[in-house]
Amino acid sequence: MATRIQVSGLDIHYDRFLAVQDVSMDIEPRQVTALIGPSGCGKSTLLRSLNRMHELVPGARVSGKVVLDGQDLYGPDVDPVRVRRHVGMVFQRPNPFPTMSVYDNVAAGLRLNHRRMPRSEMDGRVERSLRAANLWTEVRDRLHRPGSGLSGGQQQRLCIARAIAVEPDVLLMDEPCSALDPISTQAIEDLILDLKSSYTIVIVTHNMQQAQRVSDTTGFFNLRAAGEPGVLVEMADTTTLFTRPAKQATEDYVSGRFG
Amino acid sequence: MPITTEPTGRQRTPQRLGDRVFSGASTGAGVLILAVLAGVAAFLLVEAWPAVTAPAEDMPGGEGVALYVWPLLFGTLLSALLALAIAAPLSVAIALFITQYAHRRVATTLGYVIDLLAAVPSIIFGLWGVSQLAPLTVDPTGWLAENLGFIPLFAGPASSTGRTMLTVALVLAIMILPINTAVVREAFRQTPRLHEEASWALGATRSEMIRMSVLPFGRSAIIGGSMLGLGRALGETMAVAMVLSTSGGVTFNLISNGNPSTIAANIALQFPESTGIKVNALIASGLVLFAVTLAVNMTARAVINRRREFSGAN
Amino acid sequence: MSLSTTDTEPDERSAAAEPLTHGTLPASGPPLVLLGAIATGAVLWLLGWNPALSGIVAAVGYTAVVYVWSRAVEEARAARDRLITAVVSSAFLLAMLPLVSVLATVVSRGLARFDGEFFTHSMRGVVAEGGGVHHAIFGTLIITGLTTLISVPVGLLTAVYLVEYGRGRLARAITFFVDVMTGIPSIVAGLFAYALFVLFFGPGVRMGIAGAVALSVLMIPVVVRSAEEMLKLVPNELREASYALGVPKWRTILRIVLPTALAGIATGVTLAIARVIGETAPLLITVGITTSDNFNPFDGRMATLSVFSYYEYVSPGVPPEASLDRAWAAALVLILIVMALNLVARLISRLFAPKSA
């Protein structure tokens, strides 16, 4: 299920404003790729272009290519709805559907794609997803209670379970721990390491320690200058990027000199 | 900005006097509102009382005030509920179109237009209903009576003027559409982006996103807005008075000339020519209308406020 | 993902092997169908069909064609999405039809008597053609003016009370009953004013001031609500800065709070006037109608535009056309006044809005 993503020559605009310029990178399957950089450098925008979520903002548009195992996401006739089925996403703040139970939250995506899935199979898929998200033991007794009653960290794992229930190829995570306490963060990071055996994972993070802990490859984004578009400065194996960066800007950032 | 012009500015007494006068005046205004509302209830009760105590045969119809008001209340409820049944789904559709489908600039303009339509005086809907809409309903209701006459609602005989309960319900529905839509639209507009994105990211189509995120969030606004619209429809006077051809009986037949009137329309039609105990009877019916709309509006407010707390907690 | 290599679970593979593209309707397809449906509806209407029926046929036709076409070309979920889009759009367009028709009818029918005589003459001694609404325009303006004079001070002071002074049960009670008051049917407000004036003047009383009292019952809650919202928007820092200079509370409210909120309050008041100026029912039972000028709201019946329009329509003279034309023309005047007030309200809020960063 894990899939390689090749980004080439990607520009992202909001109306006239160029937010991200000329990004090219390869995201390897069954690995965790972290995107780091200062606020507003376009790393979240780039992440959202990988499942065509960014185009929900009026005026947003993209040029360049994002190829998912041989298919260009921005090719003619590509259905963004189908893209998002293959490329799941977890957000900065946990966002379980407030009116749905834990069970229904996990089943929500399944019900979209498999309208007449038998109850027993549905139960199995829900349980498998919750187990994969390390949440099963905590919620097995409250599957039919509202998902919004869980703690923040549990809600975020519920959202991960919801995303993986539809069995995507890629999982995008947009600062998934920034609203969580250290213990919940730890749980999510453990989970990311578990999940990478089955999924291609791309994670945006502000936290450089987190990038070092969970990722195999890291890309550093920065603004070319104030008011100019964000660019990919450097991308390398995580250890290399943090210990022997090729660019001065990267070294300044990872050593904490700015950002 | 001058702090104070009085030579005694440093002394506290004149300031406190000003404060007392001003806070007294504003408190008084608030209390006046309570008094007015109590007055509405009290004066209506006082003026309605003679009708309640009068001998039954003095009432119009000769069977006492309860039997005088009942067909009117029935007509009021029937027309308002029908109007609501038509307007509620339409208002959800309009609100969805404006907030989820239309281009943003178009949506803003449409919002203005809908607000403007909410301000069109009811006399104009009355004129339009009786002169434009009623004739249009003649042929379709004739067809209904012929082919679906076995359903009591369409028992017929179809009116040849179109001044039927069905037409009234349509006019009322059009009249309450703007207010219904305004409440629902506001709620849909405030759907948290986070919840919308949760649906999109699962690979939902727009309609699936609406069902999973927008509608659950707006549910109580849909109910509350509908109740507000119902309150309007219950109290609507002129449009009904002008459109409806009445005979006073209690019937579910929507397409004939013999319809029960509504409380409000009956007051408007009878009041100018009434004297004595008949005025008291009309005021008694008004009191019933007041009570019904009060109950509906209080429920609506409670539902809408509960939503506010819900979204505030998130 | 046709290039996938390691197929293990057939169920999941089949999902992953699915291409990202599928058959799609051309982007211009549904809009063209919609245009076609509208054209068909228009043709049916011109052929003498019932306009409502033509509209429904067009809407249903559009929905059906788009759904069937999409079902043939696209996958089931996309077709369902198209179906719902079509239903929502055509429900929207259908609902707009009567609203547009209302405005179009008022304008086209009202123009017949939109002439000089209509605005300069009353109905005194007029039995057939001619006559005008001079008396009714002034009646409407006088009664609405009195209503505003009553409602704005009461409403504004109540809003000040709720925002600046109100605490505890009294404030909660007022808030609640203001909400309740917004829902009072206008005819009940009319009955209230009538019952009140009967106490002083005996049965059968009709006078302009009674109408103004009835309309005030309707207008006050609207003023309170909008003024309250506006006063709440005034930042607390402004109040505190003023208190810190030793300015007493009442002067702070008069000099700082109210001026800051003035544009918003003026907008709200204008919209509230627009709401009550077209009321008919309460005036029908408290003010009645007359044919000649009466500009004294404390003495007997007055004419107002809405009641005038009503009576011209329900009890026309001979020939009836002249009365009907007058009814529509009065309605047109009324709707123009309402639109103008709405426009003024928008202008006020745009021109005098506090310039924020």
Image (cartoon, coloured by chain):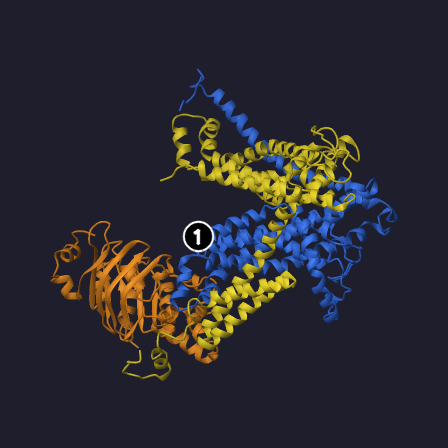
Q: Position of residue B127 (x, y in %)?
A: 68, 49
Look at the image and give the colour of chain A. orange
Q: Residue at x 38, y 82 (%)?
A: C11
Return the residue at label 1.
B105
Look at the image and give the colour of chain B. blue
Q: Residue at x 37, y 58 (%)?
A: A57
Q: Is residue A122 left or right of residue B180?
A: left
The answer to whether one can see residue A250 in this image is yes
Q: Is residue A5 left or right of residue A54?
A: left
Which element is circle 1 on? helix
Q: Looking at the image, is A195 positioned above or below residue B220?
A: below
Q: Which image quadrant is residue C210 in?
A: top right
Task: Identify which residue, C102 or A253, lies in the foreground.
Answer: C102
Q: Position of residue A86 (x, y in %)?
A: 34, 72
Look at the image and give the colour of chain C. yellow
Q: Which image quadrant is residue C341 in?
A: top right
Task: Identify which residue, C42 or B173, lies in the foreground.
Answer: C42
Q: Position of residue A256 (x, y in %)?
A: 17, 53
Q: Which image quadrant is residue C200 in?
A: top right
The answer to whether one can see residue A44 in this image is no
* Amino acid residing under circle 1: Arg
Quadrant of the frame with the N terminus of chain A = bottom left
Host chain of mark 1: B
